[in-house]
Amino acid sequence: MSTGFTLHQLFTSTETEQFLVPEIQRDYVWGPAQLDKLLSSLRVAFAKAQQALDLQVSGADATPAIVDSFLEHHRRQRFSQHLGFIYAYHDSSYPGKAFLIDGQQRLLSLYLLLLARAVQENEQADFRTQYLTSTQKVKLDYRVRAATHDFLQRFVTFVLASPAATTTPTADAVKQQYWYLSSYAQDPTIAHILDNYTHLEKQVAQGGPTYHFLHHFVKFWYFDTGDSARGEDLYLSLNSTGLLTSTGENQRALLLGAEQESSCKQYWGGKLEQWQDFFWKHRGGSNPNADNGFNEFFRWLRILAPTFAYDIAAAAEPIIQALLEAETPRALPPGFTLANADQIMHVLQLLFPKPGSTPTDKTIPAGLLPVTWLAPTGPPEQAKLSLKELFQFLPVLAYCLEQAKLPEADRWAQLPRVVRYFYNLQRLERIAKAGTQDAAKFCSEAILLAKQLGATSTGDITELLTIATTRRVSAALLPEEEKQKLELYRNAGSDRNELESLLGQLEDGPYNSGEVKHFFFKEAIPTTTLSYVRRLHRRYFDLALQLPANKHLLQSLLLLWGDCTVQDTGSYLYEQYNYGAWPSIIRTEEGGFQAFFSDFLQLEVDVATYYQRNKQQYYTGKSISTLLADTSFDNQLRLLALFFDYFQAQDPSVDKVSLWPKGNQIGYFYPDHAEGRDKPITDDQAAVFGAETLRFWNVSDRLTSATHKCRALLPWAYELFNKYNTQGFSYQQFVEARLQEVGAHLAVQVDSVTVDTATA
């Protein structure tokens, strides 16, 4: 083991004749983006190494040769570019060969770069001596992959024999050779070798780093896993120097170094490659490699290790606190072994299947588990999960580790239900808005509860009801609604899967935040029927509340059904109400939404038809004079809604013709704001409600001046009023005309007595 092998030393000064890429490793997949990033870092180091050194070498023995040798040594010490770890293991069946565990992408890219630079500088003879074996075989090979091995050997031989000044791109020239097979185009590794070399040819023509620099200034920390006694020394050495303590490289060195048997090292070397492949598949589009996710996994492993050594009851809260921190603990925790890492990785592979894989009944629906830590793109503090996300994930992990102890036939059947349960809980207000201390406590309790659930014979989430009879379970972890749903599922028989699916979709529906109790008006959840839940599901999603136009329509509709507002007590308006606080509007018991939806649920009409029908029902028989005398918020808004409905009917193409797009918060101003700070109401508008005419407050302009306080009809809407007022009505006459359209009636004066026309 050494912490300072140059590229030249790696291939010439070790006991290894060849480095082989084993079959278990993924393909060579680096492309131009990764190559350019590597080249950029090498060019920066190369430029520094070319600078004149501010050194004076003097003395009787300071001959030119000695001075040059000293300066060269000094440059290598100061300007060498370290490119991380290279891991390898030996197999007695292949004497003189070392199998790469990690480093294929970097090492093969550098091998191709060195080859391109050797041709550019006419150093082919030196390359043959240093980087081919005595029998002229490549020193970085794919011996267990026949096609890749054959291609790479022929490719390097062909390139070394080609003149540097040729104008034909290497890729084109290679494809014309008799030994280039058509099947090579389908091999990802071969395709990337060919494309990358062609890319590197163009890059080296633009300047450094030189063959000499690559040869002597590019360094690796090379770890031979056969040197088991040095693994701990390497870890301690790196920690003492502060090098790489935030990455997984020293973690791998430490774990592999702890294994004593050569066969075990080979086995775990393969496992490590499989694990890194897992993070490669989940790395996300913005990550060029899997390093970030793999490093985060090792951070998690070191923190979670005590769960294997101690009872989780004692370790839960320290685990949570450590996971909230960005740094990896340096002390070796008990339970930090490859075998325990394998248990956790098995769970991760279960919870996060390969992207694009075929879903099964055990597949976790997308969005129920936090995934950002699998492919972090920023600094470590951005990779860590929030306390809320830990509440989602750690109980599931504890459950899985307990389930793993059961016979294979009994495992995992209930896992999606358990994931869904804790996902729901973290959305509920008591947990979602808990302070750090309370949230950590809830998370710790959830881990213990999930551990107990995982140890039951079935692992079924409904076993929480049984657990609650034997010990006290916090209401935050078993709230009344969740208890009722578990009772429903426990007794549902063959209907259970469909009930869970329908209610789960409702829980995830717009503004429900994991709750459905507000939909059960007359019957209890535990005794509901599948037919009712089917209808409930269908009619709720008929509302399509994810569409702004549908929300605007429903806002106007709910004005006909009762109070659907939330008062903003913090405003400096005299009164202000929010007609767009949808979670409160939808989930308030006995509110306007419930009154509307209980009726809508029984019918088979769309929302637009339902709105038109209810306007007629609401206004028919009402006196226009009585309606105009009512200055309440809701009544004024209802009348304004009639205006906007009329505008929309006249010109459906007009963008955003609605009462609501300018904001949901509406209110009176303080009386002392009436002069100077408020736009005046036009005379014809004032003729309807006078000084009581409400004003809109556009919430997006809350911090701006009074010029953004608008008339009852917003300026652009008032223009529509004038445009479509073809009869030349006054504002009041226009209001009366709209009311008559929906069934309200005029009142007439007979002998000083007001009589409704409907009864006259």
Image: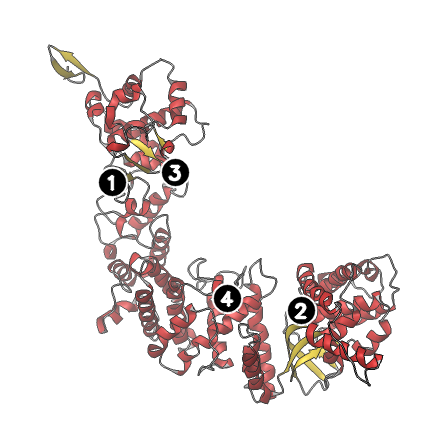
Q: Are marks 3 and 2 in contact (CB under 8 Å)?
A: no
- Crowd tier of the residue under label 2, counting other residues whose Cα lies within 10 Å: few below 14, some 14–19, many 20 or above: some
Q: Amino acid at mark 3?
A: Thr
**Which of pointers 1 and 3 lies earlier in the amino acid sequence?**
1
Mark 4 secondary-structure assignment: helix
| Circles 4 and 3 in contact, beta carbons < 8 Å | no
Of the 4 image quadrants, the one containing the C terminus is top left
Q: First in sequence, mark 4 or 1: give its number.
A: 4
| Sequence-first disc among 1 and 2 | 2
Q: Earlier in the sequence, mark 3 or mark 2?
A: 2
Find the distance from the CA under tag 2 to the CA under tag 4.
Answer: 23 Å
x and y percentages locating residue 575 in the rendered image = 25, 37
Q: Position of residue 567 (x, y in %)?
A: 25, 42
Q: Which residue is mark 2?
A: 105
| Amino acid at circle 4 | Pro
Element type at mark 2: helix
Q: Who is closer to the viewer here, 109 or 478?
A: 109
- Marks 2 and 4 in Cβ contact (< 8 Å): no
Can residue 150 be seen?
A: no
Q: Quadrant of residue 94?
A: bottom right
Which residue is most to the front?
Answer: 59
Q: Which residue is mark 3?
A: 704
Check disc 2 and give the amino acid type: Gln
Asked if residue 190 lies left or right of residue 713, the reply is right
- Report which quarter residue 396 is drawn in: bottom left
Badge 1 marks a residue whose secondary structure is helix
Query: Which label lies toward us, 4 or 3?
Result: 3
Q: Which residue matches tag 1? A: 592
Q: Earlier in the sequence, mark 4 or mark 3?
A: 4
Percent of width and height locating residue 597? 28, 41
- Label number found at residue 656: none
Task: Indicate whether 303 appears above or below 588.
Answer: below
